[in-house]
Image (cartoon, rainbow, N blue to C red):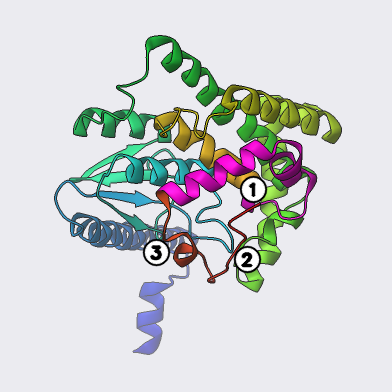
Amino acid sequence: MMEGVVGVVWPRDWLGRGRTLLASLGIIFLTRKFIKYRKKTQLRREWDSVGKDVVLLHQFASGKYCPNLSPFALKLESFFRLANIKYKVDTKTPFGPKGKCPWITINGEDVADSEFIVEHITQRYQVQIDARLDPHKAATLQAVRVLVDEHLFWCVLTWRYWVDGCVTFLKSQSFSPFLRFVFPLFMKSGIRRRSREQGIGRHTPEEIYHICKKNCSTLAGVLGEDKFFGGEEPCTVDCAVFGQLAQLMWNAPGSRYEALVTKVHPSLARYCLSMKEKLYPDWNKLLKPLSVMPTTL
């Protein structure tokens, strides 16, 4: 009897065996699809449970000294706080429909890319925090936003993951031993390829640092004696600038990149602390593990 069962499941002829293999692969494929569907359905129920008109911010977990390793996640969280938008954080699914982090879910709708999200929320909730800016100031700040999101970001990203090989960056994170081992393995080669495609990775480490230094000098020049880039009060662009500068201020401990903010251009360090004080009274509670950094220069 047993031989008969085996003969049906695994026939002697190759054609029969091929059918068995195809059927097995089909079952595996359908099972995986079903599991993925159930997981997605369960996650969607969890996301919807946050409440109507509440933004669910999908992002990475916190680090030791900074609430996020992603400048764009910190940009969004800062914007939500500045605009008094109700939001909750999800760290289970940091990568969204475009394969990027962060992204949001609101009332069952998914929105990706930090700048599109800012525009979406601004229109949905009629956010007016930039209404006081005159056209010239608004245009200047938009140029500043492009500088930090599209230029400074690539300098820091390339140095952090490729040039420095994650060595300095890992000091600021609370990764597990396994992740601390594998993280540099795939990030170093991946960012090397991406940065070379973008262009910044074709420069030498000294040239990349020089570009980053010029970016910081430009930001310090635009900031001048003001407390925020928006003046006496922060504006939307301040959230983007803070997201990027915070990576130098808190996620590059002991490096010359950190020194660009803390020593070369101390006005940028004061700016970071002002943004932190303004928007994050719970900063230390957000860190993992709880770590206390200096609050004054």
Mark 1 in CB contact with mark 3 (< 8 angstroms): no
The magenta segment is 249-278
The answer to whether residue 182 of the structure is visible from this angle is yes
Query: In the image, is residue 276 part of the stretch drawn in magenta?
Result: yes
- Residue drawn at x 72%, y 31% is 212
Tell me the residue that label 1 is attached to. Answer: 249
Name the spot of residue 57 as percent of width and height, x first: 35, 50
> Which numbered disc, 1 or 3, marks the residue that appears first in the sequence?
3
- Residue drawn at x 45%, y 63% is 286
Q: Is residue 148 left or right of residue 159?
A: left
Tell me the residue that label 3 is attached to. Answer: 24
Tell me the residue that label 2 is attached to. Answer: 179
Q: What residue type is labelled 3?
A: Ser
Name the spot of residue 278 as percent of width and height, x first: 42, 47
- Residue drawn at x 47%, y 59% is 283
Q: In this view, does 186 lie to the left or right of 84?
A: right
Q: How far apart are marks 1 and 2 (CA)?
A: 23 Å
> Which numbered disc, 2 or 3, marks the residue that appears first in the sequence?
3
Q: Which amino acid does label 1 sit on?
A: Met
